[in-house]
Amino acid sequence: MSANKRTIEVFTAGCPVCRETIDLVRQMAASCGCEVVERRCEGETCCAPAISYGVKALPTIVVDGKIAFEGRPTLEQARDLLAV
């Protein structure tokens, strides 16, 4: 495990695909000790962070302030995203 814990933000809309994505990311992050933050994009709730990162689709996974993946990743893609 890395000495520096990474922050993973998952921008969601509360739909089933978004729910599957956040669940998968949390499952994969449990082994690396990364912090996972869900940002629900409803109304004005996450507009500022979404705009600052350039989020254009939901779900979107942001790792340490950079867009890492748009859409629902497969298990292998999620594992690769969180690989230390």
Image (tube, rainbow, N blue to C red):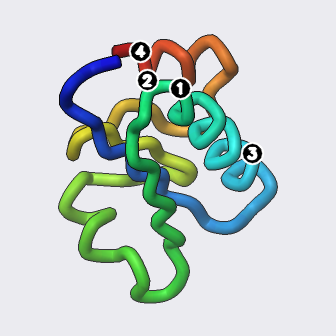
**Residue holding disc 1:** 31
Q: Amino acid at mark 3?
A: Glu
Question: Which mark is first along the chain, 3 or 1?
Answer: 3
Total of numbered circles in the picture?
4
Please identify, in this view, whether the residue under mark 4 or under mark 3 is nearer the observer: 4
Element type at mark 3: helix
**Residue holding disc 2:** 82
Element type at mark 1: loop
The image position of residue 73, as x and y in percent, is 62, 28
Figure check: 76 above or below 60 = above
Figure check: 57 above or below 21 = below
**Residue holding disc 4:** 83
Q: Amino acid at mark 1?
A: Ser
Q: Are marks 4 and 2 in contact (CB under 8 Å)?
A: yes
The quadrant in which residue 64 appears is top left
Q: Amino acid at mark 2?
A: Leu
* Image disc number at residue 20: 3
Q: CA distance from mark 1 to mark 3?
A: 18 Å
The image position of residue 83, as x and y in percent, is 41, 15
Question: Which mark is first along the chain, 4 or 1?
Answer: 1
> Viewed as shown, does residue 65 lie left or right of 20?
left
Q: Are marks 4 and 3 in contact (CB under 8 Å)?
A: no
